[in-house]
Amino acid sequence: MLCLAQGMAFGVGTAGIFTLSIDLTISTQRSAGNMIFNWLARLGMLTGIALGTVLYLQYNFETVIHVSVVAEAIALFAILITHVPFRAPIGVSVCSFDRFLLLRGWLPMLNLIFATVV
C-alpha cells in the first residue's frame, strides 16, 4: 500500500513539474528543454535509487529517511523560489473534465494500469 501511495505521489509530482517546465520554457526551445528535463528526471531517479541503496547498506534506514527529507526540502525550496507568471485562461467553464478524461486516452490508461499490476 505504501508503494502505491508513493507511486501516485511521484506521478502527480512529475506531471506537475513537467507542466511547469513546459510553461516556463520559451516556445522555440521547448522541445530541447523537455528533452533535457526528461533526462535529468531519469538521472535523478537512478541517483536516488543508488544513493538510497548505498546509504541503507552503509548506515541504516533512519539515515535514508533523513537524507530524503533534506533532499525534499531543497527541492521544495527550489520550486517555491521559481517565479511562474500567472496567465488567466480565457473562456473556461467552472468545471471541465475534457482535459483529463479524453475518449482516446482510455486505452492507454488501461494499458498502463495493466502494466503496473503485472
Image: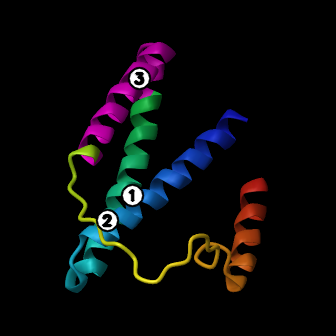
Which residue bears the numbered disc 2? Answer: 21
Q: Quadrant of the N terminus?
A: top right
- Answer above or below: position of 63 versus 67: above
Which residue bears the numbered disc 1? Answer: 17
Left or right: 80 as drawn, with respect to 97: left
Which residue bears the numbered disc 3? Answer: 55
Q: Amino acid at mark 1?
A: Ile
From which residue to which does the magenta span run? 54-79
- Secondary structure under tag 3 reads helix
Residue 116, horizontal then vertical, whole percent: 72, 56
Residue at x 69%, y 76% (from the top left corner): 108
Left or right: 105 as drawn, with respect to 54: right
Q: Amino acid at mark 3?
A: Leu
Q: Main secondary structure of the magenta part?
A: helix
Residue at x 74%, y 77% (from the top left corner): 106
The total number of labels drawn is: 3
Query: Residue 63: within the magenta?
Result: yes
Residue at x 40%, y 66% (from the top left corner): 19
Quick one: label 3 or label 2, which is nearer the N terminus? 2
Q: Distance from label 3 to label 2 (Cα)?
A: 31 Å
> Nearest the camera: 116 or 103?
103
